[in-house]
Amino acid sequence: MAGMWTDRVGARRVILVGLVLAAAAAAVVGFSLANTVVTLVCLALFDAGLFAAQVANQSAVLAIDPLAPARFNSAYMLVYFVGGSLGTAFGAAAVDWFGWPATALIAAAAIGVAATITVFVRPASTSAAAADQVAR
């Protein structure tokens, strides 16, 4: 579904909506851990938001050079998994250091930074680079 939506409205919009959804879910779950239903809904929304953003990000990365999708996908997935591993390690330590509510708010803030970058940083045009690759 995220892929179809990315094709219809563009990767940046899907990334932004996914990040906003994930940040909101993280903020809410920070204060509702005692409520099982709310926690499960927030975790599902958090996962869905980040998954949608990941799918849209991956489509944007693959569009950099349509003639070399494996190379770009490999680099993207390497960074994705290293980042996820570091985030998991920090998250586990942060819960011990700061407690669950603060850790959830830190996660929401980090996602907010990513959303801000998505809004304000414009990517370089890839159409000229892709045209140059096709011409070669």
Image (cartoon, rainbow, N blue to C red):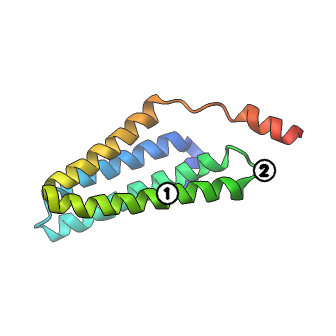
Residue positioned most to the right: 136
- Which tag, 1 or 2, sits closer to the chain's start? 2
Query: Which of the pair 27/105 is nearer the observer?
Result: 105
Disc 2 secondary structure class? loop
Disc 1 secondary structure class? helix
Find disc 2 in the rendering and name its residue: 67
Amino acid of disc 2 = Leu
Q: Does residue 121 lie above or below 102 as drawn? A: above
Residue 1 percent location from the top left of the image: 52, 59
* Quadrant of the image containing the C terminus: top right
* Residue at 41%, 60% in the rendered image: 84
Q: Is residue 121 left or right of residue 128?
A: left
Query: Which of the pair 58/37 is nearer the observer?
Result: 58
Q: Does residue 22 lie above or below 131 as drawn? A: below
Residue 111 percent location from the top left of the image: 34, 46
Residue 33 percent location from the top left of the image: 14, 64
- Badge 2 density bin: few <14, some 14–19, many ≥20, Cα 10 Å: few
Q: Does residue 117 lie above or below 100 as drawn? A: above
Find disc 1 in the rendering and name its residue: 80
Q: Does residue 132 lie above or below 53 as drawn? A: above
Q: Nearer the viewer, mark 1 or mark 2?
A: 1
Q: Is residue 18 left or right of residue 94?
A: right
Q: Is residue 54 left or right of residue 29?
A: right
Amino acid of disc 1 = Tyr
Q: Is residue 46 visible?
A: yes
